[in-house]
């Protein structure tokens, strides 16, 4: 996996329970539907809160999405 | 105050490690802490000093406070990053949030230091040294930067302990350890002994903290006045101030200054800069519900000559235009016409603003101006400082509210425990 940290357009579900679920994002003008979330965790490095999702799509490609709470921006962090 | 347990938490090379962690989080391949790097101003806008440096940069002899070009000469490969005070504030608040989980009494001492009163928490959270190690590890895991923690029975010893060996360490310095841990240190390592005092003490044959502790207090008082007794007590580890929850320090004055990217040679530009500084200072003044009776302006010329001028006002003020008018007059009186690179505006002799004595000689429309300031302040609080600016700044190339780094609420350094 390579670190990209690229902001992406994202469709996500924010459940009333507070849980966040990424659904679909745009990568290089192609829409990508998020397959399965393998792991979710939150990090607070340098006081900057990010919710991280390690995801996998068919064809076994693992990638990492991060949602930055303060700026409300989604990042494709690793691919 | 026997039986107290105080911890001092100090972030290791704060500005640099915060920036390093933030960069790593954003996927930067290198850790700034592992290469010669420094946080420093922008040379193009002449904000050119080193604010913090990494440990590898320290090996090249790079010092905090020296000009960027000098540091570059010592270490040509030095990686420079600009300061980002909003990031520092974020890191600082995240740190304080964690500390407050361990004790209700946490005093934020500066942007990267805090005191934590652990007295009475042992029953719930275990022995202080064990907790300090856990706390240090938790901060490293969760926030990504390292801290030093000093544990002792008062604030002074805790602070001295946290400075013993860096980075990422826990030290204790209880009264019984003073003799072998603190006394062999050079005297300038003691809190409140600066360069000048150290020189005076050295001329008296006092080279280590131990020498100071056994010196004659009468002689110290004679040479250094009351400060001599203070450092004499500190050398023996005597200090008993309480941990003030929150941030507590009675403010004596406030000011803002700015190094201008170009040399100012005409009155018009100088006035704009003064107005811009007045905006920042008087906004802070009103925010802290104070008014001031002394205004001082200081000028640094392009050849680094320095001049300052101040005035005591008959009635206290906190209105932007009043501050500006006085500052402009002081500037005109002090300025000799040479090119200026740095202007500072400072207000002192602060007082509460709930009752202000009016005077027959007040500027007209004083009440109206105050109401205007109040309205502008609330708009700026809601929508940002740049939401309302004076028309004279449009296309002037000068920021409408100069000075300030976003860290006004916590001083970078302080001398009162």
Image (tube, rainbow, N blue to C red):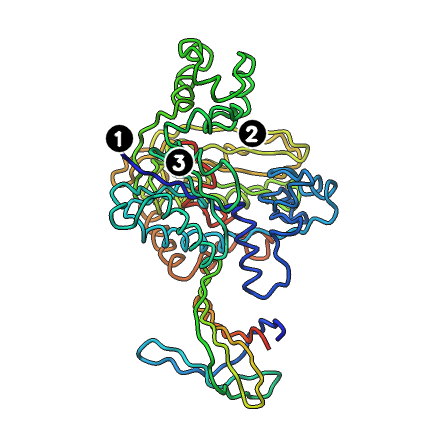
Q: Could you classify mark 2 by the number of other residues whose Cα lies within 10 Å: few (under 14), some (14-19), or many (20 or more)? A: some
The residue at the point 61 percent across, 45 percent down is B53
In this view, B389 is above or below A62: above
| In-front residue for pair B245/B140 | B140
Q: Can you say whether B195 is above or below B368 in the image?
A: above
| Label 1 residue SS | loop
Give me the residue at 50% from left, 73% from top.
Answer: A66
Circle 2 residue: B334
Secondary structure of the residue carrying tag 2 is helix
The local secondary structure at tag 3 comes to helix
Instruction: Classify the position of the N terminus of chain B by image quarter.
Output: top left
Q: Label 1 belongs to which residue?
A: B2
State the mark number for residue B39.
Answer: none
Tag 3 residue: B158
* Mark 1 and mark 3 residues within 8 Å of each other at the beta carbon: no
In front of the other: label 2 or label 1? 1
Mark with earlier residue (2, 1): 1
Residue B252 at what x, y percent from top left? 38, 33
The foreground one among B397 and B193 is B193
Gap in Å between the C-alphas at discs 2 and 3? 45 Å
Same chain? Circles 2 and 3: yes
Give me the residue at 34% from left, 38% from top: B6
Give the total of numbered labels: 3
């Amino acid at each position: 996996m390579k670190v990209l940290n690229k902001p992406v357009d994202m469709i996500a579900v924010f459940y009333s329970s507070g849980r966040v679920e990424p659904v679909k994002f745009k990568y290089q003008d192609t829409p990508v539907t998020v397959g399965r979330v393998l792991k979710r965790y939150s990090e607070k490095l340098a006081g900057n809160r990010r919710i991280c999702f390690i995801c996998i799509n068919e064809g076994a490609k693992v990638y990492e999405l991060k949602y930055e709470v303060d700026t409300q921006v989604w990042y494709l962090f690793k691919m | 105050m026997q039986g107290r347990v105080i911890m001092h938490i100090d972030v290791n090379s704060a500005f640099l490690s915060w920036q390093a962690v933030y960069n790593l989080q954003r996927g930067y391949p290198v850790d700034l802490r592992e290469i010669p790097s420094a946080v420093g101003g922008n040379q193009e806008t002449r904000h050119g000093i080193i604010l913090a440096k990494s440990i590898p940069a320290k090996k090249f002899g790079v010092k905090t406070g020296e000009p960027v070009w000098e540091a570059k000469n010592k270490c040509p490969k030095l990686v420079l990053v600009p300061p980002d005070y909003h990031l520092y504030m974020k890191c600082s608040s995240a740190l304080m949030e964690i500390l407050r989980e361990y004790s209700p009494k946490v005093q934020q001492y500066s942007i990267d230091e805090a005191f934590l009163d652990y007295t009475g928490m042992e029953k719930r959270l275990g022995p202080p040294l064990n907790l300090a190690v856990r706390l240090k590890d938790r901060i490293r895991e969760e926030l990504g930067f390292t801290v030093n923690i000093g544990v002792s029975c008062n604030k002074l010893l805790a602070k001295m302990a946290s400075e013993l060996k860096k980075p990422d360490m826990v030290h204790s310095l209880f009264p019984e350890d003073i003799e072998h841990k603190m006394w062999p240190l050079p005297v300038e390592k003691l809190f409140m002994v600066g360069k000048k005092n150290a020189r005076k003490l050295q001329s008296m044959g006092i080279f280590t903290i131990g020498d100071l502790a056994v010196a004659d207090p009468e002689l110290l008082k004679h040479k250094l006045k009351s400060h001599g007794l203070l450092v004499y007590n500190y050398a023996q580890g005597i200090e008993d101030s309480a941990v003030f929850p929150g941030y507590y320090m009675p403010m004596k004055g406030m000011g803002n200054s700015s190094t201008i990217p170009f040399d100012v040679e005409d009155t018009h530009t100088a006035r704009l800069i003064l107005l811009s500084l007045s905006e920042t200072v008087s906004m802070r003044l009103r925010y802290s519900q104070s008014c001031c009776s002394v205004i001082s302006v200081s000028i640094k010329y392009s050849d680094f000559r320095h001049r300052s001028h101040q005035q005591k006002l008959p009635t206290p003020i906190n209105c932007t235009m009043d501050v500006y008018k006085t500052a402009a007059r002081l500037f005109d009186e002090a300025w000799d016409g040479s090119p200026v690179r740095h202007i500072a505006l400072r207000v002192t002799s602060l007082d509460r603003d709930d009752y202000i004595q009016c005077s027959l000689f007040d500027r007209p429309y004083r009440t109206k101006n105050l109401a205007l300031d109040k309205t502008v302040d609330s708009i700026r609080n809601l929508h940002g400082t740049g939401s309302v600016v004076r028309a004279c700044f449009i296309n002037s190339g000068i920021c409408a509210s100069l000075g300030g780094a976003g860290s006004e609420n916590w001083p970078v350094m302080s001398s009162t425990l």
